[in-house]
Amino acid sequence: MRRLFRTLAASAFACLLLPFGAAQSNATTTSVQASPIDLTSGFYTDPNSNPALWAAANPGDGRAAAIRDNIASRPMARWFGAWSGDIGAAVGSYVGAADAADKLPVLIAYNIPGRDACGGHSGGGAGTPAAYQAWISAFASAIGSRPALVVIEPDSLGDFSCLSQAQIDERNGMLRGALAQFRDRAPNAWTYLDAGNPAWIGASTMAQHLDGAGAREAHGFSLNISNYFTTGENTAYGNAISSALSASYGYTKPYVVDTSRNGNGANGEWCNPGGRRIGAVSQTGGGGGGAEMLLWLKTPGESDGDCGVGGGSAAGQFLPEVAYKMIFGY
C-alpha cells in the first residue's frame, strides 16, 4: 500500500509539471517509471544470511551478540549461483520476502561460465553460454515487476589477461544478454555491471570493458566488491571511469561502492587479509564523493577462499572469528 501511494504521488507530481493540455492528453497513455528506491521503504535485511543463521544457532558463543548486532542486522546483498538450486524459486522467494516487507533487496548474479578464470579462488559457473542464458533469464523473470538492485557477475570485467579475444567476445555477449533479460523481464530492477576496484586496471581501460559489455543498457556499475579500498579511493576511481565513458563513448553511468569491509582500507592484499574492518552501512548517496549508493555487497566474515586468515576455508564459507575481528578492526 505504501509503495502504491508513492507511485501514485510521483505520477501526480509529474503531471503537475506538464502544461495543462499535455497533462490531459497524456494522462491515459503515459506512466511514470519510479525508481526501485522510491518504490520501497529502505533496504532489505536478510534474516537468513550466514551471519544471522550462525548467531541464531550459537547463542551461547561470546561472539554471537556482536556478530548479530553489527553484521547480521545490517542490510546486505544475497549472492546467487549454482548453489542456489532452482534459480527461479530461489530468487522469487527472496524478492518476494523483501516485497512483502516493502524493502529493497540487493541481489548478485554470480554464475557466468569461466567465473574467476584468472584468479582461481571462486571458479565455476554455468557450463555453457546457453546454460547461462537460461539461468539468467529465469533469474530476471523471478524478479518480475518487483523492485530490486542486481549486480551482474563480479570480477567478470576486471581481468582479461588469461582470456583469448574469442573468450572476451563470448563473455561480453553473455553480459549484454543478461542486461537485455533484466530490461525485458524485470523493469523495476536497476542493474549494475561490476567494474572491479581502484588497484586493478586503469579507469580508461575499465570504461572500454564496460562499454564492450553493454554498459549503455545497465543502470550503472559497481566497485570494490569483496575488496577493502576506502570509499574515497573508490569514488575517485568511479568518477574517473565515468569521465572516461563520457569522453570516449558519449555517456556516463552512476556507480555504487561496496563498503562492507573497507573500514580500515586495504593493506595490499585481497584474499582474507587480517586487520580489516566493516565499513559504512548501506545507504543511498555516497557521502558527497559521487557514488549513487554505498552498499554491503560482500558479507563480512565470509571467506574469499583458501588464503590469508581464512586458510583452509572455501570461498563464501562463514568464519565467525574473522567476522568478530572485523567488527573491531583487528
Image (cartoon, rainbow, N blue to C red):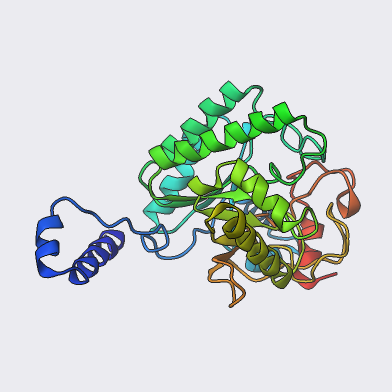
Spot occupied by residue 200 in the image (x, y as percentages of width and height): 79, 53
Q: Is residue 116 visible?
A: yes
Q: Is residue 112 left or right of residue 135?
A: right
155 or 168: nearer the eye?
Answer: 168
Q: Quadrant of the N terminus?
A: bottom left
Could you tell me which residue is drawn at 31 percent across and 60 percent down? 3
Residue ID at (77%, 29%): 164
Residue 282 versus residue 130 in the image, above or below: below
**Where in the figure is residue 6, as x and y percent of width and height?**
29, 65
Of residues 211 and 88, the one nearer the viewer is 211
13 on left or right of 75:
left
Q: Which corner quadrant of the image does residue 236 belong to? A: bottom right
Question: How many marks can you see?
Answer: 0
Quadrant in the picture for the C terminus: bottom right
Residue 119 versus residue 258 in the image, above or below: above
Where is residue 100? Give x, y as percent: 37, 52
Furthest residue to the bottom?
288
Location of residue 33 in the rendering, given as x and y in whole percent from the top left corner: 32, 55
The answer to whether residue 258 is visible is: no
Query: At 45% across and 57% down in the image, what residue appears?
Result: 104
Tell me: 12 left or right of 20: right
- Would you identify the image quadrant in which residue 52 lies? bottom right
